[in-house]
Amino acid sequence: MALSPVLSRHWDEPRSWTLDTYRSHHGYRALERALRSDPDEVIATVKDSGLRGRGGAGFPTGTKWSFIPQDPATPAGAKPHYLVVNADESEPGTCKDMPLMLATPHTLVEGVVIAAYAIRASHAFIYLRGEVVPVLRRVQNAVAEAYAAGYLGRDILGSGFDLDVVVHAGAGAYICGEETALLDSLEGRRGQPRLRPPFPAVAGLYACPTVVNNVESIASVPAIVLNGVDWFHTMGTEKSPGFTLYSLSGHVTRPGQYEAPLGITLRELLDYAGGIRAGHRLKFWTPGGSSTPLFTAEQLDVPLDYEGVGAAGSMLGTKALQIFDETTCVVRAVLRWSQFYKHESCGKCTPCREGTWWLVQILERLEAGTGTEDDLDKLLDISDNILGRAFCALGDAATSPITSSIALFRDEYIAHLSHGGCPFDPRLSSLTAGGPS
């Protein structure tokens, strides 16, 4: 399967981030077309395209837009509508939204205007991680250019549509990637998940109907509006149509972003990335970031779409393909991920707050070789008590690498106990060549 650069087509051009460069590649043509259509027609186009949310869950984008109450006679319909772009990219291994905003921020801005027009919102917010200052400045500058050119503000392109966009810098919290925690943070409160229902489509930002979409989801809209539904369906699979960004990191020859149709396999992507680093072999990998169950070389030919990955026992998530070769200690990798989830837990619910703490304590014992085989059963028991019982998906995410790694690499956990520490540590005299596979 060939790569399909759409979002990334102009990333390597000089000053790709400027309005002039973007307009030289048909920038804002899709907006002109959308503004000549009825908002409901735009929603129908995105719905018919089958575009699925690129932030992890894969929920159909057009369907999400259609949930916004449009009848002004109802209390919800009479309230202002808001569009919020979730640019708080923080899943370990995920690095697609930041380079997109850095290279071509106007793709996102145009998508924001089209989406806001479709859901009849006059205010939109781009919630960005405050630590990534270069990206923050790039997006702020793109918004300023769009205002100056008449793509934002009052009476956009003479259509009568008004839209103001605010670029908001978050203070840095993984939990704010959860859409309701993001909304609380945007309102000035501590970022913690909300109880649902009500869902954001009914009572979101400022208790008004709100659509929250990932950066890549919104940035994909202009190409769909400009080129049409049939064009979008020439890529991907029947249930997961279109193109997407796959982030390859770790032990590959050429890590980076690879834009391809949904349904490509890791084996094909590795061919483009130069394969596993010289002299080594694939041991395990994540199909969608650290919160998805691990895969091994046996899943090299699994179609990387929502159905294919799900059927193989994991989740496509953010398409963050972290690649690990045989020199990696799976116990240490899982411990590092678990420490991240413990640190980033907001503490609102007991299963996540207490469960992630205990997971780390036990994993630290196992990694140091001071635990017992019973600790593996304790890990699974705690994970079972967290799964499905936490207030949001962070608790579930913390259990995935643990349960899948024990299922796939139980012998390696036991090897830590018999070696009195990590068998991959060169300081241990009992190290065998290459360590356990």
Image (cartoon, helix red, strand yellow):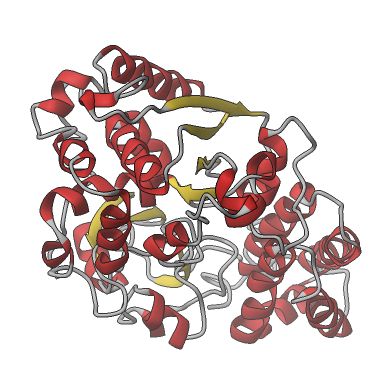
Residue 236 on image: x %, y %: 22, 71
Between 258 and 374, the one lying in front of the other is 258
Between 105 and 338, the one lying in front of the other is 105
Task: Give me the residue at 41% from left, 57% from top.
Answer: 54
Number of callouts in the render?
Answer: 0
Query: Quadrant of the image for the N terminus?
Result: bottom left
Task: Give me the residue at 57% from left, 55% from top.
Answer: 201
Residue 139 on image: x %, y %: 40, 24
- Picture layout, residue 102 above or below residue 48: above
Residue 424 on image: x %, y %: 62, 64
Between 73 and 376, the one lying in front of the other is 73
- Picture layout, residue 20 above or below residue 3: above
Instruction: Report if residue 208 is visible in the image.
Output: yes
- Picture layout, residue 42 above or below residue 189: below
Residue that lies at the very extreme toward the top in this rendered image: 148
Choose top left, top right, bottom left or bottom right for residue 402.
bottom right
Residue that lies at the very extreme toward the front in this rendered image: 73
Instruction: Report if residue 178 is visible in the image.
Output: no
Residue 257 on image: x %, y %: 31, 49
Task: Give me the residue at 56% from left, 53% from top.
Answer: 73
